[in-house]
């Protein structure tokens, strides 16, 4: 499975990439902001985008919506250093998006998440 | 004022009745005194005196009344028309009175309503008119030849010192006639000049009598022209004009009184109304009595050096917008208040001033209240700002923690997870250690930003020095090792910290100077830089937050930052050593 990692922290990106590779994912690219993320998604056509909710230029949620509107969209897994409860029960999650808090991120976890959805 | 009104009206009515009765009695007795002119004249003058007494203030009233009485006196003396055969002296007096009638009348018109002529040109006119009038009647009295004299030299009076010389009195009379035509024209000119100069309100008071004065002057000039041209029969219609004019005088004075009453009446009402006005109603009361619903009231706050309205909100500079004018109440340097009103009210300056002084006490009260409100509003606003500043500070802390240390620790977590499967991988270990070090450093910085430990432990001077060590520009600092109360030191520290942060951020400065010292029981902290200037406390900005922090300690923060001339941030905080 081809993965694009979008996060503005380089050390997180590199460590997450290594972790996912070790779990058998093909990490095809990394992006540090929303604009790059959209460009890379067009260019690389990944199957999965691991997307941080807080990006320096735009919200990750906006990126998720835009990706979802494309033909044959990638699966989007949102991530954040906050946990799901921090966003509240009435938070408007984009349709079809999975969520994993950063501190729970693992290759196995991601696999499970993708097979369920 | 209003309580006196009935008294003077009754006095006027009584005087009128008495005068009419008196003339009738005199006529009945057939003493020769009861001239038809007197019947008009005496009551008119009495009404005039009463009216003059009813308006204005002492001694103006008395002066005006005396002037009208003088006019009555010369009028009566002239009207008596004593016959030469009866009494030489009486006839001479009557003659002089005849001559004085015109200048006394002119003085009365020009002096109304103050009872005194202050204008230099008008005084000059009177100084010419009086001697000329006396000379006019005196000349034939002294030198007239009773055998040849006709017309102006009044043959009813034989010459006192007729020398037997043939003196052509007709020529002299013509010269006088010509001079009096000029004087009559001068009266008209003076009246027109006065009306043009008078403010609107004063004009309304004076106009009726001025019209009567112009009318009389025109009549006088017409008589002199008739004399010159030799139309003796012109005297007949002029006699009626004279009577009509006599009636015009009390009417005119009454009209003036009515105008003054109309203007002063509201002030009387205002005194009552302002006495009962509740706070916040003074503007409305003033607007009502001055007849200007758009009237704005600005109360001067000396400590702010600005005007505020009754609610304590800042009033825009009462600058002249079209059609608006401002009238200060109280001394110009330290006014009590300002009225911003329609420009047309300017014509009623006496009314404005009267309203101002009538309302002084109420205004003073309102000002104190406005002052209190303004302080309260400022206090509320600063309290809100302090709360808002605390909120935004917490948001900033959350963001800093989230973006800084937390991210580092998350990365550390990932690295440890990977290390579990790749035991002993030196690159992973290195990265994990680096993340941990960064997380610790960021937590340290954050803690120092919340409250520097060095400030608590070693005081302001040491804390400021540690700030200075971390800025890139050259800083000269004058820092006594004195300790102050904790809140004072904290506020002073943040003043320096914020000012230095601004130096680094915007000021394009190359050097800065910090001075800290005690002055008159206050800790004075000053940070001066040589940058581009133009700094100001903006809502929600760091400098505003500082001002509130310093204000909460009863201190004052001033920012002097003219564009291009550097910035000086200065805080003065009341302090006691601890």
Image (tube, coloured by chain):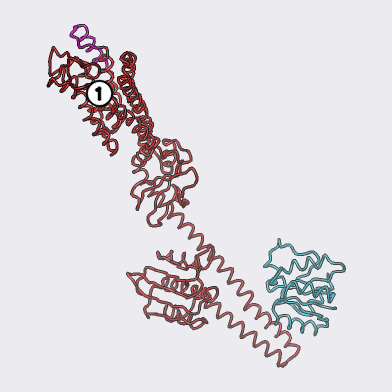
Chain colours: A cyan, B red
Q: Which residues are magenta?
A: B14-35
Q: Is residue B461 left or right of residue B17?
A: right
| Marked residue chain, label 1 | B
Q: Is residue B156 left or right of residue B572?
A: left
Question: Disc 1 designates what residue?
Answer: B171
- Residue B525 visible from this viewpoint: yes
Q: Position of residue B552 (x, y in %)?
A: 43, 64
Count of all numbered marks drawn on residues in the image: 1
User: Any magenta on residue B23?
Assistant: yes
- Look at the image and tell me in which quarter the N terminus of chain A lies: bottom right
As rendered, which of A18 and B68 lies closer to the eye? B68
Q: Position of residue B573 (x, y in %)?
A: 39, 68
Q: Quadrant of residue B53?
A: top left
Look at 46% across and 54% down and name the residue there.
B377
As rendered, which of B249 and B221 lies closer to the eye? B221
Relative to residue A68, is residue B161 depicted above or below? above
Q: Quadrant of residue A70?
A: bottom right
Relative to residue B42, is residue B108 depicted above or below? below
As rendered, which of B431 and B357 lies closer to the eye? B357
């Amino acid at each position: 499975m081809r993965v694009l990692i979008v996060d503005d922290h380089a050390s997180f990106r590199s460590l997450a990439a290594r972790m996912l590779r070790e779990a058998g994912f093909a990490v095809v690219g990394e992006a540090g902001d929303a604009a790059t993320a959209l460009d890379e998604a067009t260019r690389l056509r990944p199957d999965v985008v691991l997307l941080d909710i807080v990006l320096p230029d735009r919200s990750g949620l906006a990126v998720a919506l835009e990706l979802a509107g494309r033909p044959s969209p990638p699966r989007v897994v949102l991530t954040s250093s906050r946990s799901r409860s921090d966003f509240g029960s009435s938070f408007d999650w984009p349709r079809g998006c999975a969520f994993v808090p950063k501190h729970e991120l693992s290759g196995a976890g991601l696999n499970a998440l993708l097979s369920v959805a | 004022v209003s309580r006196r009104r009935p008294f003077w009206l009754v006095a006027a009515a009584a005087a009128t009745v008495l005068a009419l009765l008196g003339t009738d009695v005199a006529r009945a007795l057939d003493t020769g005194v009861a001239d038809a002119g007197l019947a008009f004249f005496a009551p008119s003058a009495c009404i005039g005196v009463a009216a003059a007494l009813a308006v204005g203030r002492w001694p103006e009233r008395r002066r005006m009344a005396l002037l009208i009485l003088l006019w009555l006196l010369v009028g009566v003396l002239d009207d008596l028309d004593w016959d030469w055969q009866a009494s030489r002296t009486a006839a001479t007096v009557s003659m002089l009175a005849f001559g004085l009638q015109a200048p006394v009348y002119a003085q009365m018109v020009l002096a109304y309503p103050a009872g005194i002529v202050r204008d230099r040109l008008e005084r000059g006119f009177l100084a010419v008119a009086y001697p000329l009038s006396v000379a006019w009647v005196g000349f034939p009295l002294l030198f007239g030849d009773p055998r040849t004299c006709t017309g102006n030299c009044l043959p009813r009076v034989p010459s006192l010192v007729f020398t037997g010389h043939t003196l052509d009195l007709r020529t002299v009379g013509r010269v006088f006639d010509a001079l009096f035509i000029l004087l009559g024209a001068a009266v008209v000119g003076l009246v027109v000049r006065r009306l043009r100069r008078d403010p609107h309100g004063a004009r309304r008071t004076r106009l009726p009598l001025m019209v009567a004065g112009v009318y009389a002057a025109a009549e006088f000039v017409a008589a002199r022209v008739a004399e010159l041209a030799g139309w003796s029969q012109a005297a007949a219609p002029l006699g009626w004009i004279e009577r009509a004019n006599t009636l015009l005088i009390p009417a005119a004075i009454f009209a003036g009184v009515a105008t003054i009453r109309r203007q002063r009446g509201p002030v009387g009402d205002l005194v009552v109304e302002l006495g009962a006005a509740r706070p916040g109603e003074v503007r409305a009361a003033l607007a009502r009595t001055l007849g200007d619903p758009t009237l704005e009231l600005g109360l001067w706050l000396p400590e702010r050096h600005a005007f505020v309205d009754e609610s304590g909100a800042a009033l825009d500079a009462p600058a002249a917008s079209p059609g608006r004018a401002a009238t200060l109440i109280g001394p110009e340097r330290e006014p009590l208040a300002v009225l911003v009103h329609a420009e047309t009210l300017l014509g009623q300056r006496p009314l404005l001033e009267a309203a101002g002084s009538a309302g002084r006490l109420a205004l003073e009260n309102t000002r104190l209240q406005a002052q209190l409100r303004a302080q309260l509003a400022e206090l509320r606003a600063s309290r809100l700002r302090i709360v808002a500043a605390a909120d935004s500070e917490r948001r900033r802390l959350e963001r800093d923690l989230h973006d800084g240390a937390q991210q580092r620790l998350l990365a550390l977590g990932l690295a440890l997870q990977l290390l579990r499967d790749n035991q002993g991988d030196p690159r992973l270990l290195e990265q994990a250690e680096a993340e941990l070090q960064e997380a610790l450093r960021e937590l340290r910085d954050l803690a120092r930003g919340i409250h520097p430990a060095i400030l608590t432990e070693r005081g302001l001077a040491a804390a400021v020095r540690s700030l200075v060590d971390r800025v890139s520009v050259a800083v000269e600092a004058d820092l006594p090792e004195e300790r102050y109360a904790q809140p004072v030191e904290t506020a002073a520290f943040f003043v320096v910290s914020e000012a230095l942060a601004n130096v680094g951020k915007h000021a394009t400065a190359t050097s800065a100077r910090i001075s800290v010292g005690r002055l008159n029981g206050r800790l004075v902290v000053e940070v001066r830089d040589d940058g581009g200037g133009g700094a100001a406390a903006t809502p929600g900005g760091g400098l505003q937050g500082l001002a509130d922090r310093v204000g909460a300690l009863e201190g004052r923060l001033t920012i002097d930052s003219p564009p291009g001339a550097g910035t000086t941030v200065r805080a003065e905080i009341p302090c006691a050593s601890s």
